[in-house]
Structure formats: C-alpha cells, structure tokens
C-alpha cells in the first residue's frame, strides 16, 4: 500500500512538527550537497528553525557565497538604470583590456622576448611552463604517430588479404585454362584418329571421290552445207 498524499500546511502538533523538520532538513542538506558535486555548482543553504537555531551548508564557504550573491545582486540592480549600465560595461572593458595585455606579455615571454625585466623566480616559472608545454606537445605527437602507425598496419593487413584473394582467383583461372587446353587437345587427337581410320571413298574405276571435278563443254562444228545439229554433246572429264 502506497503512502498517501501529504497536505502542505503547518503541522499543529509540536512533536510531529519537530520530527518533520529534522527529516526534511537532513534531506534538503543532502540534496544540496549532491547538487554541488554532480553539477559543479556553488551552493549555499541557510536554515533557521522555529526555535531560532541555525543550520547551514556551503559547498565552498558561506562567506564567499554570500559575497558573490550580494555582488551579483548589486550588478543586476545597476543594470536597471542606463547610467549605471554604462559604468558597468566600462569597468568590464577595462578589465578585459588588462587581461589581454597580460596574455600578450605572457606570449612574448614564452617566445623568448622581453626577459630582461623578469626575476629569477619568474624565469624559473617560465622554464617550468615551457617544459610542461613541450612535454604535452611530445605526448600529443607520439599519440598521433601511434594512431597513424595503427592505421597503416590495418590498411596493410587489408591489402594482404585482398592480395591472397586475388592470388586464389588467378590460380583457379589457371587451373580452368589448363583443363580447357587438355580437353581441346583430346578432342583434336580423337578427330585425327577418326580421320586416319576412315580412308576417303573412291570410285570403282580408281578415281578419288574427293578429287576436283572439271566440266568442259565441247564446241559445235558448224558446216555451211549441213544443217545445225539437233543436240549438243556434253563432255564430262574427270581428273
């Protein structure tokens, strides 16, 4: 059986009210702590009981949380009027300009320029920063080279596998070609054997049937006093 819905109103019984306060206070502080850890938020909680007891929680420091809150509250109030808004943005521009000058100065120092005004401690810090940057660059370079080598090895393995497949296809084609050649030579030998076992047919008078036959028509001999012949003689000559 589930819990019934609780009506949000003041609890008249003092004992029940104190028990509920203790439970809800512990749950609220726990949720505030979880929120600050999970979301990387700066959280501050202040609780006063009905007996004027103070309970608070701050992810960093309660004073810093209150100061930050008052500062943001003041800035939001200043932005409401145009004059205060102009002053606020002027301060922001000046702050950003100082930050830019600082970054440009650090960049010149990293490039080896304007080092005469630095103290020994500043030069030592600059050296440590350069060593850390160089170490990071080398690690990044080694990682890139390692990734490229792995990619080349992978492509080489794929090329080797494709080469093996092509070699198998070539061997199969060569085998099929050899079988076709053997089959063609066998058919040729069979036809030659059949031709040698069956000599060409000849006529009974000794003439070869496969010899060429030449037909020659005899020319008629016309005479002046004789009538033309009734028929023409067809001469057949076999060679």
Image (cartoon, grey):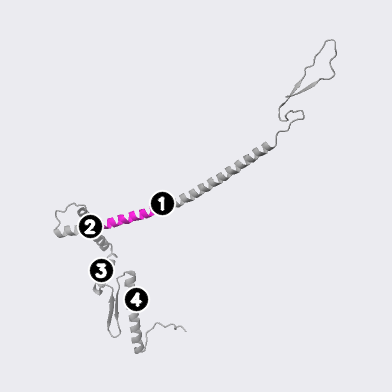
**Horizontal and vertical percent position of residue 147:** 36, 55
**Horizontal and vertical percent position of residue 174:** 53, 45
Q: In this view, does 10 lie to the left or right of 213?
A: left
Check if mark 2's residue and mark 4's residue have beta carbons within 8 Å: no
Residue displayed at 49% across by 51% down: 165
Q: Which of marks 3 and 2 is nearer the N terminus?
A: 3
Of the two numbered discs 2 and 4 in the rendering, the one whose residue sits closer to the viewer: 2
Which residue carries the number 3 mark?
A: 71
The magenta segment is 133-152
Q: Bin the neighbour count of mark 1 within 10 Å (Cα to Cα): few under 14, some 14-19, many 20 and up.
A: few
Cα–Cα span, label 2 and label 4: 43 Å
Q: Which of 122 and 89 is in front in this view?
A: 122
Cα–Cα span, label 1 and label 2: 37 Å
Which residue carries the number 4 mark?
A: 31
Which residue carries the number 1 mark?
A: 156
Check disc 1 and report its element: helix, strand or loop. helix
Q: In this view, does 213 lie to the left or right of 9?
A: right
Cα–Cα span, label 4 and label 1: 55 Å
Which residue carries the number 2 mark?
A: 131
Q: Bin the neighbour count of mark 3 within 10 Å (Cα to Cα): few under 14, some 14-19, many 20 and up.
A: few
**Horizontal and vertical percent position of residue 224:** 83, 10
Q: Nearer the viewer, residue 89 or 214?
A: 214
Instruction: Label the magenta part by its dominant secondary structure.
Output: helix
Q: Earlier in the sequence, mark 1 or mark 2?
A: 2
Q: Which of marks 1 and 3 is nearer the N terminus?
A: 3
Q: Earlier in the sequence, mark 4 or mark 1?
A: 4
């Amino acid at each position: 059986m589930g819990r019934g819905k609780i009506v949000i109103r003041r609890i008249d019984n003092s004992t029940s009210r104190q028990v509920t306060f203790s439970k809800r206070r512990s749950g609220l502080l726990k949720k505030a702590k979880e929120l600050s850890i999970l979301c990387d938020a700066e959280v501050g909680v202040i609780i006063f009981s009905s007996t004027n007891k103070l309970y608070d929680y701050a992810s960093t420091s309660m004073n810093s949380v209150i100061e930050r809150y008052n500062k943001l509250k003041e800035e939001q109030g200043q932005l409401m009027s145009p004059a205060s808004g102009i002053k606020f943005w002027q301060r922001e521009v000046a702050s950003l300009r100082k930050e830019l000058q600082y970054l440009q100065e650090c960049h010149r120092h990293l490039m080896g320029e304007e080092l005469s005004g630095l103290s020994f401690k500043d030069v030592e810090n600059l050296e440590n920063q350069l060593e850390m940057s160089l170490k990071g660059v080398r690690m990044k370079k080694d990682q890139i080279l390692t990734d490229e080598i792995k990619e080349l090895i992978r492509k080489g393995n794929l090329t080797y596998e494709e080469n093996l497949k092509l070699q198998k296809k070539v061997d199969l084609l060569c085998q099929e070609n050899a079988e076709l050649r053997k089959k063609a030579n066998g058919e040729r030998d069979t036809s030659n054997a059949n031709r040698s076992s069956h000599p060409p047919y000849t006529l009974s008078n000794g003439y070869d049937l496969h010899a060429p036959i030449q037909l020659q028509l005899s020319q008629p001999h016309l005479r002046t006093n004789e009538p033309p012949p009734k028929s023409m003689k067809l001469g057949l000559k076999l060679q």
